[in-house]
């Protein structure tokens, strides 16, 4: 089964390469085509230290938006100088492409045998890369102690078959944004945002009623085509699947998941009129325009609406929990730093990846939330009060399912279920039964 799944992942990436290689070029960067042994691991000749006086190149690949940012470029220059000083005989080369090109090209690089040594891996793509054998086992290379300071929920996103196959680099979390002025209009205490699902539903209904429907109590981004308001579900003890020895079992017939669907259905009268089509960016803009009373969102609310940073009408708080006894939670995503299993110099490449996630450079070489707890003080989340609540919320960020090759398909199945319940009015028990069958069908793929 595992070999069949791995083969499927290889075919997927190779098909991407066939269609995109001509446009992207061969990406040859000196970090590939090295000799390997019969098992596919680098041979002894490939892992030898550089000969005296000879500089060996280590290629880092990411997207241009971070590499070329003036502030980040300065930090990258310092990182390069530090690494080359501490690792004589190696030189670091930064390669990048714009976001739209990068996301395709880095897949092509691996599928065509021209992988960089160190690279950013997009969280949703991680399962395919890990399953295809493209990633170096960093736990074995760096040691388990190297992973102690990462947020647990974020660290779990880069685990594969019990191994650490990437270092968490950036992450994000959603928090509750709420309009204090609208709270006052609705007779709610502007300093006491909802802390549980029951309060969230009550507050959303009260806002909609007291404003005569002019303000939506809660903004839902069903048009995002992902697991809507997933942060609410992660504020439970639930997971939508379990994985045991490679066997995927749906775990959605539970009070947590059925309660989540019921909450979304019950809040339907409080959503904006076009909740089924608007994505997270458009919903956050409506919040900035004070047309929505509450929304669960990330930093993009103020990133996309710069004038909102100076506003005083809104507040932020942790995502409401299922009930008072439930754990805090929020959906987390982001990017990892991985090392190619075919790197000529895996140990040096692993050290370079580790430097990116170090306290000195993690918060300075990207614009998202550092996934390293100790790196937070060096980031904007420690100095900008606009993001203060994120420092606390990120500790509880996680995803609602462990990583498998079918992560995206299961996520899409849950999205369809939420849509059937909120838009189509499908009964909860029927929706859950259909979802269980769908997850089993997905997991049975060869």
Image: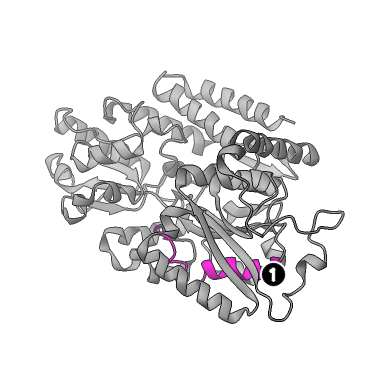
Left or right for 160, reference 37:
left
On screen, 87 above or below 416? Answer: below
x 39%, y 21%: residue? 423
x 34%, y 68%: residue? 382
Left or right for 304, reference 441:
left
Q: Quadrant of residue 37?
A: bottom right
Q: For this rendering, which residue is in front, 299 or 13?
A: 13
Q: Is residue 338 visible?
A: yes
Indicate the quadrant containing the C terminus: top left, top right, bottom left or bottom right: top right
Residue beneath disc 1: 347
Residue 88 x, y percent position in the rendering: 63, 80
Residue 286 x, y percent position in the rendering: 23, 37
Magenta-colored span: 345-367
Inspect the magenta stretch and tell me whether residue 336 lies in it. no
Q: Quadrant of residue 207?
A: top left
Left or right for 243, reference 215:
right
Q: Secondary structure at mark 1?
A: helix
x 41%, y 65%: residue? 73
Inspect the magenta stretch and tell me whether residue 358 lies in it. yes
Residue 128 x, y percent position in the rendering: 65, 43
Q: Is residue 127 visible?
A: no
Residue 433 x, y percent position in the rendering: 58, 24
């Amino acid at each position: 089964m595992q070999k069949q799944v791995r083969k499927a992942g290889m075919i997927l990436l190779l098909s991407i390469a066939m269609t995109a290689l001509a446009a992207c070029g061969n990406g040859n960067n000196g970090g590939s085509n090295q000799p390997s042994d019969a098992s596919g691991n680098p041979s002894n000749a490939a892992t030898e230290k550089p000969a005296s006086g000879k500089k060996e190149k280590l290629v880092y690949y990411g997207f241009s938006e971070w590499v070329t940012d003036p502030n980040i470029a300065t930090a990258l220059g310092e990182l390069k100088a530090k690494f080359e000083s501490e690792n004589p005989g190696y030189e670091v080369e930064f390669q990048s492409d714009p976001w739209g090109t990068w996301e395709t090209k880095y897949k092509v690089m691996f599928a065509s045998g021209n992988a960089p040594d160190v690279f950013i891996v997009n969280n949703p793509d991680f399962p395919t890369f890990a399953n295809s054998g493209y990633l170096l086992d960093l736990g074995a290379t760096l040691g388990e102690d190297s992973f102690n300071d990462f947020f647990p929920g974020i660290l779990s996103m880069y685990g594969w078959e019990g191994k650490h196959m990437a270092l968490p680099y950036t992450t994000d979390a959603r928090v509750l944004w709420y309009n204090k002025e609208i709270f006052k209009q609705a007779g709610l205490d502007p300093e006491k945002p909802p802390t549980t699902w029951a309060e969230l539903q009550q507050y959303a209904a009260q806002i909609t009623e007291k404003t005569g429907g002019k303000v939506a109590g809660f903004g839902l981004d069903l048009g995002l085509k992902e697991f809507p308001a997933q942060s609410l579900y992660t504020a439970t003890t639930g997971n939508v699947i379990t994985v045991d020895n490679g066997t995927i079992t749906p775990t959605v017939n539970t009070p947590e998941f059925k309660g989540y669907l019921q909450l979304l259905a019950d809040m339907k009268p409080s959503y904006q009129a076009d909740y089924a089509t608007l994505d997270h960016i458009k919903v956050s803009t409506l919040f900035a325009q004070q047309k929505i009373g509450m929304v669960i969102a990330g930093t993009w609310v103020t990133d996309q609406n710069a004038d909102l940073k100076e506003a005083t009408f809104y507040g932020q708080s942790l995502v409401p929990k299922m009930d008072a006894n439930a754990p805090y939670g929020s959906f987390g995503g982001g990017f990892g730093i991985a090392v190619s299993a075919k790197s000529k110099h895996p140990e040096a490449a692993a050290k370079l990846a580790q430097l990116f996630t170090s306290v000195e450079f993690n918060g300075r070489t990207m614009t998202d939330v550092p996934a390293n707890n100790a790196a937070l003080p060096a980031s904007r989340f420690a100095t900008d009060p606009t993001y203060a609540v994120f420092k606390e919320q990120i500790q509880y960020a996680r995803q609602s399912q462990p990583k498998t090759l079918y992560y995206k398909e299961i996520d899409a199945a849950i999205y369809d279920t939420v849509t059937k319940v909120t838009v189509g009015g499908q009964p909860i028990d029927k929706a859950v039964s259909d979802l269980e069958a769908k997850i089993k069908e997905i997991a049975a793929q060869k």
